[in-house]
Amino acid sequence: MTSITAARDLWLGLDTGGTYTDAVLLADGREVVASAKSLTTPWNLAIGIGRALRAVLDLLPQGTNRANITLVSMSTTLATNAVVENRFSPVCTLVIGFDDAMVERSLLLRHGGRDIVIRVPGGHSATGDESAPLDEAAINRAVIEHAERVEAFAVAANFSVRNPAHELRARKLIRALSPKPVTCAHELSSKLDAPRRALTAALNARLTPQIRHLIEALSHGGIANKVQVNLDWIESEVFENEDPAPFLEHVDGILVPGGFGQRGAEGKIRAARFAREHDVPYFGICFGMQMAVIEAARNLCGIEAANSTEFGATSEPVVGLMTEWMKGNELQKRGAASDLGGTMRLGAYPAVLARGSKVADIYHADEISERHRHRYEVNTAYKDRLAQHGMRFSGMSPDGLLPEIIEFDDHPWFIGVQFHPELKSRPFAPHPLFSSFIGAAVEQSRLV
């Protein structure tokens, strides 16, 4: 190990990636004197960062003065991945004291997609004095009107870095009317460029809900079973080059959540296979259900080319683009060239449950309504072949055209759903699927 004199400056770099968090120490900005890594903990990045930091500091040569660390740099690829893959949640951004030119310069309307931008009178001057009173009634109207259409709120006020009072008041008003997360621009940037701060706040707000609902729903399931749920987040791309067994043989349940795109898909398919073959409780949500169906088609039905058209052309489209479906009494249509986001199957849809199925027993009902957010669907042309090998389509749309739930009768707990049950789970009213899944994981823990 290189000897470090007391006179040399040390620079510390930290980066959180999809799988690992890396830490490195440089001497005089050039020479690597220590490096370490730890598994990334997406539910709380501070845990993985802390582990990597402790590991790299432990590798410093004896006698090194940690006070010589004069620069710390942190970065993350998690947000970059979300941007590239367009994995955003719709948000409502309240811009306080902005004129038309400032809104245009913020690029919010160009980056927003399904986002909503509301101008609210108020804001401060460069000296921190109030330019105009905050229009609290306008904020209340915006929250009441848009809360059900968005997953988070962002607030950006003119010169909030000089005086954040209007942003803080707006957040308090929003929280009084909606439980959804609120991001304030002044807490993310100290720069005076208000339009750029507004865009930063909106981007942050879009990312916040991505895993919040899922983590909370799992916790709710733990409450129902009087256990604490310990989460082990694993980047599915790892399984594309490595045997999943060392990563999964210690877990009591496997959940594959919703997602988009081909990255990591083969790893999720291998995780579904591990759960099926080793009788580990498996919960596939939306994309997670689709990957489980592809796995069964390949390895049970012998359809080697089984795949999703989301990943490109395939001779065996087990999962494909929906072209039409019913919403109430109205026929919804789209084509392959349709906009990816604007024509998704969004909102609440009913499903009919098969009598005697595991899900009918879990729900204590024959018909349910759940919230959807997807563009691709399991192809019912493969339904009979999959059923011959034990996969039961236990939930279907009322017209019998769209699969909503799959399960295996000969498995302790293997369920895939096309919808997002985490969106309807609450601490004292946990979603029945999460309660049942955690219950199955508890039972699994007693068997190993």
Image: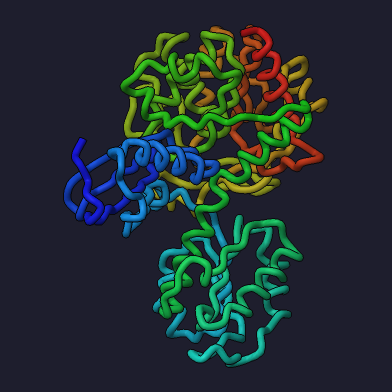
Color encoding of the figure: rainbow
Q: Is 179 in front, or is 165? A: 165
Left-right relation of 155 to 399 = left
Q: Residue at x 73, y 67 (%)?
A: 144
* Residue 321 x, y percent position in the rendering: 46, 37
Q: Is 445 positioned to the left or the right of 256 in the image? A: right
How many labels sit on residues?
0
The residue sitting at 56% across, 19% down in the picture is: 251
| Quarter of the rendering containing residue 345 | top right
How far from the left and from the top, in percent, is residue 394?
67, 21
The image shows residue 54 at horizontal and vertical percentages of: 42, 39
Q: Quadrant of residue 221?
A: top right
Question: Considering only vertical position in the picture, is 123 above or below 45?
Answer: below
Q: Nearer the viewer, residue 217 or 383?
A: 217
What's the residue at 44%, 82% (across, down)?
A: 102
Position above or below: 324 against 299: below
What residue is at 57 percent from the left and 47 percent from the top? 332
Camera-nearest residue between 273 and 428: 428
User: Is residue 299 at least partly visible in the picture?
Assistant: yes
Q: Quadrant of the rendered structure where residue 110 is?
A: bottom left
- Can residue 352 be spotted in the picture? no
Left or right, residue 53 beside residue 411:
left
* Quadrant assignment for the C terminus: top right
Where residue 96 sits in the image (x, y, percent)? 57, 80
Which image quadrant: the N terminus? top left
